[in-house]
Image (tube, rainbow, N blue to C red):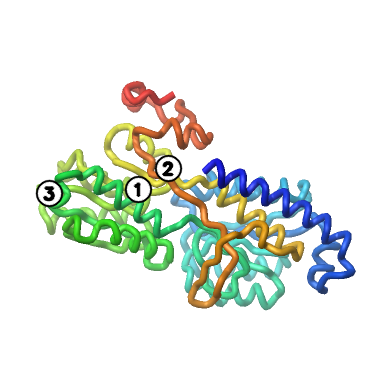
């Protein structure tokens, strides 16, 4: 993770140097480059995030992206922000507003990766470059950054197998996947199945509408009713929010001490890990992803090349070989909380070890 952050920091320097060069050499560039270069740091960036139920978007993604954009533009950039609150139609309206407001570049984390396609096309037709953030949006996007989503699923699956040990085939597991409107959910599922298939018996599997914890809770209650509470040995949960809903259902049914996975290292999930209620989460360092989005957006707004920033290529159903930055992930368990979320400044020990969690934190040496 540290190497990724250093590489991105170096990329930011390259972007800054390239910006100086483009201003000096504007006469030799394309018309779009001349226009952007003449504008310098005074750019307008649109930022659209998908929902506010998952803690990460408002607590980490938004402030990190905005901070990096300001750093890259000497505080001169204007950032127009909105959150779609899990409503694809609202997000389409928000894209229209960004077009009306004449942003120079748009960073969008799509509620529905397919439904956003027409909006992406409208933005591009208006001369606005689009950076797909965290989810691979359909349409003529110019750049993409996310985590290796198949690897996320593999990491979750491997952790669940580790937790189950010789109990892996003694009962059944429940798989609680994410929303079908999110292409990342399909990749998480793919990665998890590649690890779990043939090594566990999957009793029930769900695609959870809108990633909502309450929907995961209802699905888990149905799984318990169908399988019997004594036959479930573990739960694959694609993210932490759903894990919370799942664990509530398990407790209500009198089921305890079975491993549950997660993703996003939400504070509540870290506390559940400390307490032994959730086995793991996938820690995704948001700063490298946010920095990459900001760097690519600023470069595109200024008409600059992305080759010094984006070393990967990703293809969607409507765009091929999109310049991309993919960030590594880490399995977060009770054994490495100090070395991950605390070391990276995501949370302090005081934030994690409140009230009923203090004794467990002391036992684990969390400080």
Q: Is residue 82 left or right of residue 148?
A: right
Coordinates of residue 162 in the picture (x, y in percent): 25, 44
Residue in front for this viewpoint, 105 or 213: 105
Residue under label 2: 266
Q: Which mark is residue 337?
A: none
| Residue ID for mark 1 | 262
| Mark 1, other Cα within 10 Å: few <14 / some 14–19 / many ≥20 | many
Name the residue that disc number 3 marks: 229
The C terminus sits in image quarter: top left
Residues 1 and 291: in front is: 1
**For the point 35% across and 33% down, which residue is it?**
335
Q: Is residue 294 above or below residue 250?
A: below
The one of 253 and 320 positioned closer to us in this rendering? 320
Which is nearer the N-term, disc 2 or disc 3? 3
Secondary structure of the residue carrying tag 2 is loop
Camera-nearest label, 1 or 2:
1
Q: Residue at image x 55%, y 59%?
A: 145
Closer mark to the observer between disc 1 and disc 3:
1
Mark 1: secondary structure: loop
* 332 relative position to 195: left or right: right
Residue 20 in sight: yes
| CA separation in Å, label 2 and label 3 | 27 Å
Left/right placement of residue 160 relative to residue 351 reads: left
């Amino acid at each position: 993770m540290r190497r990724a952050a250093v590489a991105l920091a170096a990329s930011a320097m390259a972007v800054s140097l390239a910006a100086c060069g483009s201003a000096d050499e504007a006469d030799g560039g394309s018309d779009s480059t001349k226009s952007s270069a003449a504008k310098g740091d005074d750019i307008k960036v649109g930022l659209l995030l998908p929902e506010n139920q998952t803690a990460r978007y408002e607590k980490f993604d938004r402030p990190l992206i905005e901070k990096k954009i300001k750093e890259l533009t000497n505080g001169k950039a204007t950032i127009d922000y909105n959150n779609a609150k899990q409503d694809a139609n609202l997000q389409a309206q928000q894209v229209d507003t960004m077009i009306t407001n004449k942003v120079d570049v748009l960073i969008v984390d799509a509620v529905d990766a397919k439904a956003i396609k027409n909006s992406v096309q409208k933005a591009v037709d208006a001369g606005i470059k689009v950076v797909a953030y965290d989810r691979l949006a359909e349409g003529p996007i110019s750049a993409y950054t996310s985590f290796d989503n198949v690897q996320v699923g593999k990491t979750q699956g491997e952790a669940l197998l580790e937790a189950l040990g010789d109990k892996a085939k003694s009962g059944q597991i429940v798989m609680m996947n994410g929303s079908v409107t999110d292409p990342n959910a399909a990749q998480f599922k793919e990665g998890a199945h590649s690890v779990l298939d043939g090594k566990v018996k999957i009793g029930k599997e769900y695609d959870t509408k809108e990633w909502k914890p309450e929907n995961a809770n209802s699905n888990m209650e149905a799984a318990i009713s169908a399988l019997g509470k004594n036959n479930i040995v573990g739960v694959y949960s694609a993210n932490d929010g759903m894990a919370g809903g799942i664990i509530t259902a398990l407790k209500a049914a009198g089921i305890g001490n079975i491993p549950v996975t997660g993703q996003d290292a939400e504070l509540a999930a870290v506390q559940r890990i400390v307490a032994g209620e959730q086995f793991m989460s996938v820690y995704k360092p948001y700063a490298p992803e946010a920095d990459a989005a900001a760097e690519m957006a600023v470069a595109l707004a200024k008409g600059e090349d992305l080759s010094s920033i984006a070393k990967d290529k990703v293809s969607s159903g409507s765009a091929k070989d999109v310049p991309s930055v993919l960030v590594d992930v880490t399995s977060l368990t009770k054994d490495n909380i100090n070395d991950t979320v605390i070391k990276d400044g995501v949370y302090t020990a005081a934030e994690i070890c409140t009230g009923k969690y203090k004794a467990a934190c002391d036992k684990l040496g969390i400080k």
